[in-house]
Image (tube, rainbow, N blue to C red):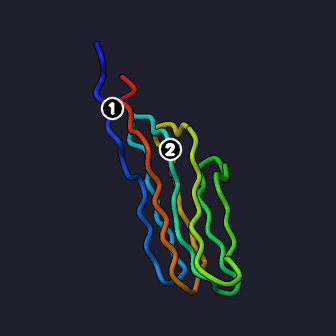
Amino acid sequence: MARAVYSTRFISLVTSSAASESYTVPAGYTAVIRDINGVMWPEASTTAYVEISDTGLLLVYWTAPTDTYENFRWQGRQVIDSDETISAVSNSPGPVYIAVSGYLLSAS
């Protein structure tokens, strides 16, 4: 019997200052990250990253562009187990937008 599969936006971080947003995979589910997209404006000492907080696995890391805003994108298949946490973090004093999306699959 086929299972229904639904796309999910795990994180939508929109900030103009240092901030973070997290998503914990619910018990009984597995998350598959397929896309990480973002925009960063040039500001001194700006970095942004997405990680699996519980494991320390760094998925992506970006530094500020030098002269104009920059789009960044990551595509792949990263499996996140139940009760693990996906985090998007920015230390930017300026605008940063990060979206993390993929599938949330029932483990049963």
User: Crowdedness of circle 2 by 10 Å Cα count: few (<14), some, many (20+)?
Assistant: many
Q: Amino acid at mark 1?
A: Val
Q: Is residue 30 left or right of residue 93?
A: left
Residue of label 2: 33
Q: Is residue 28 above or below residue 75?
A: above
> Of label 1 and label 2, which has the lower sequence position?
1
Q: How many marks?
A: 2
Question: Distance between the Cα atoms at labels 1 and 2?
Answer: 13 Å
Question: Which residue corresponds to the image point at 57% horizontal and 75% vertical from the top-left?
Answer: 40
Instruction: Judge by depth and name the residue closer to the eye, 48 or 53.
Output: 48
Image position of 24 (left or right of 93): left
Q: Is residue 64 above or below residue 43?
A: above
What is the quadrant of the C terminus in the image? top left
x 51%, y 59%: residue: 37
Identify the residue at the far front of this view.
68
Is disc 1 placed on a helix, strand or loop? loop
Which disc, if any, is residue 67? Answer: none
CB under 8 Å between discs 1 and 2: no
Residue 5: mark in rendering: 1
Name the amino acid, label 2.
Answer: Ile
Quadrant including the N terminus: top left
Q: Position of residue 20 (x, y in %)?
A: 50, 69
Residue shown at the point (69%, 87%) measured from the top left? 44
Q: Residue furthest top?
A: 1
Secondary structure of residue under mark 2: strand
How crowded pointer 1 is (Cα within 10 Å; few <14, some 14-19, many 20+) is rated as few
Q: Quadrant of residue 91?
A: bottom right
Q: Residue 49 in the image: x percent, y percent?
A: 62, 63
Q: Quadrant of residue 90?
A: bottom right
Q: What residue is at 55 percent from the left and 80 percent from the top? A: 18
Place of residue 100 in the rendered image (x, y in percent of width and height, measured from the top left): 47, 54
